[in-house]
Image: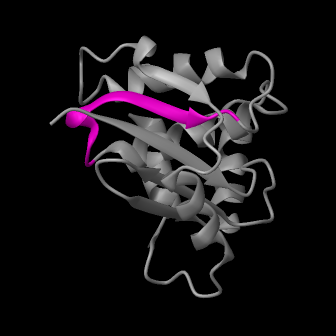
Amino acid sequence: MVITVYIDISAKLENWTADSVVAMTDGVALVLVVPSAVKQAVRAWLRERFPSRRGSYHAYVLLVILIYLILQSEVEHVESIVIDADYMGEGSQGKIENELAPLLRRNRPHLSGKQIHFQKIKGTRADKLAREVYLEKNRQRWRHLVFAETRSVLEK
């Protein structure tokens, strides 16, 4: 079965003091809660490892890691990845595509950057699920990201 997945994030990743929620739908529905403490730990680790990188670089890297992690269970079936472009700035799509495609090729060698798309996905299942989980008071039933998962992706 070949699928197109839609990925949305509620709460901007670059808001380092707020939790974020990543949702992926179509074919499956997966959620990843990203606690602010994990976001801050990733940013600190990136600052230490890449001291010359500033600004939005840390958020781009975190976004790429989150997409990679949420796609892991379905990557062999994915034909097309649609990422919400709602918060993307000029030039950011190419940066994200250039970082994400090599990571995804670890498990799917023939995957091309041309299979990664950016568009506004407001109103899709991914958008609704990400917002719904973000607004929940108790998110314990959802998978929570831990820093070790992000670090393992970065160190490979």
Q: Is residue 3 above or below residue 108?
A: below
Q: Is residue 90 above or below residue 33?
A: above
Identify the coloring.
Answer: one colour
> Is residue 84 on the magenta stretch?
yes
Expressed as whole percent of the image width and height from the top left, the position of residue 25 reads 41, 51
Asked whether, in this view, residue 47 is left or right of residue 80, the answer is right
Expressed as whole percent of the image width and height from the top left, the position of residue 50 reads 69, 30
Asked whether, in this view, residue 156 is left or right of residue 44, the answer is left
Q: Is residue 85 above or below residue 124?
A: above
Asked whether, in this view, residue 146 is left or right of residue 110, the answer is right
> Is residue 9 on the magenta stretch?
no
Quarter in which the N terminus is drawn? top left
Q: Residue 49 occupies which quadrant of the picture?
A: top right
Q: Nearer the viewer, residue 70 or 53?
A: 70
Q: Residue furthest left?
A: 1
Q: Which residues are magenta?
A: 73-85
The residue sitting at 49% across, 84% down in the picture is 140
Expressed as whole percent of the image width and height from the top left, the position of residue 69 reads 41, 47
Q: Residue furthest right?
A: 55
